[in-house]
Image: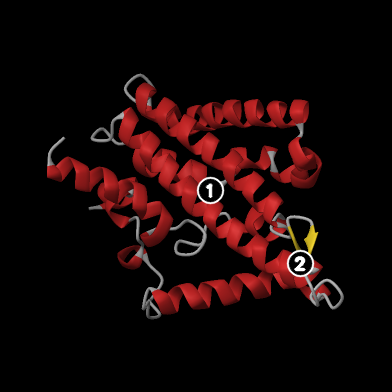
Amino acid sequence: MDNNNKNKTLKILTNGIIKENPVLVTMLGICPTLAVTTTLIDGLGMGIATTFVLICSNMTISLLKRVIPSQVRLPCYIVIIAGFVTFVEKILAAYNPMNLYESLGLFLPLIAVNCIVFGRAELFASKKENNPALSALDGLGMGLGFTFALALMGIIREILGNGSILGFDLPLLSENPVFLFSLPAGGFFTYAIVIAVMNKLLKKTPREIGCENCPSKNNCRHRTISN
């Protein structure tokens, strides 16, 4: 593998973790992010499940993109994604490690309509120049970025809201938890703080909303058609 290919694969992998983090940068998948991050375990569980679906659906769609008619590509993507989501749901229901199936609840099957998963299928896996291996790598990068964001919020909310981490009580904090962080309002507050810190670290400045400032503009099918 030459340096150009190495740089390309590394860029695809790291884009989802840092530059195009689906939660912290492009602000997708906010609903499950706020709902399941009351503990670290729940955040990790949702992140890992979504990562599996991202990798498998991206790879499958990339393999089948030449035989899927463009007129029905969106319904086909949904069927493929829903199939992998159902597989994950049944596995968790059967084994249910750390009561994840009950904890994630409705948000587990809703991975099927998660805009992160659907967006990567449309913006990356369906492109002619992206082979199944690159599509799987893109899914892995986006999944890791999503998992990182959920884990980070889960750590903050569990420590401050419950005074514990992974079920172990922390000195002082366990006796004086800030219950706000366990509530939905605490999820919004934590998310706002994490976004502010992320913007500061990336030295981002406020931008006008529109296609020109979208981090995925180069891969957007509708932008290509309109041009």
Q: Do the residues under discs 1 and 2 have CB atoms within 8 angstroms?
A: no
Q: How many marks?
A: 2
Seen from the viewer's position, the closer of residues 161 and 219 is 161
Q: Is residue 183 visible?
A: no
The local secondary structure at tag 2 comes to helix
Q: Amino acid at mark 1?
A: Cys
Question: Horizontal and vertical percent for residue 117?
Answer: 50, 42
Residue 107 percent across, percent down from the top left: 70, 45
Is the residue 20 above or below the residue 208 in the image? above
* Residue farthest to the top, as pictured: 67
Crowd tier of the residue under label 2, counting other residues whose Cα lies within 10 Å: few below 14, some 14–19, many 20 or above: some
Q: Quadrant of residue 20?
A: bottom left
Tell me the CA gap for discs 1 and 2. 21 Å
Furthest-front residue in this view: 171
Amino acid type of the residue that numbered disc 2 sits on in the rendered structure? Pro
The residue at which mark 2 appears reads as 184
Q: Quadrant of residue 18?
A: bottom left
Q: Can residue 122 be seen in this snapshot?
A: yes
Residue 145 located left or right of residue 226 = right
Residue at (74, 72) in percent of width and height: 160
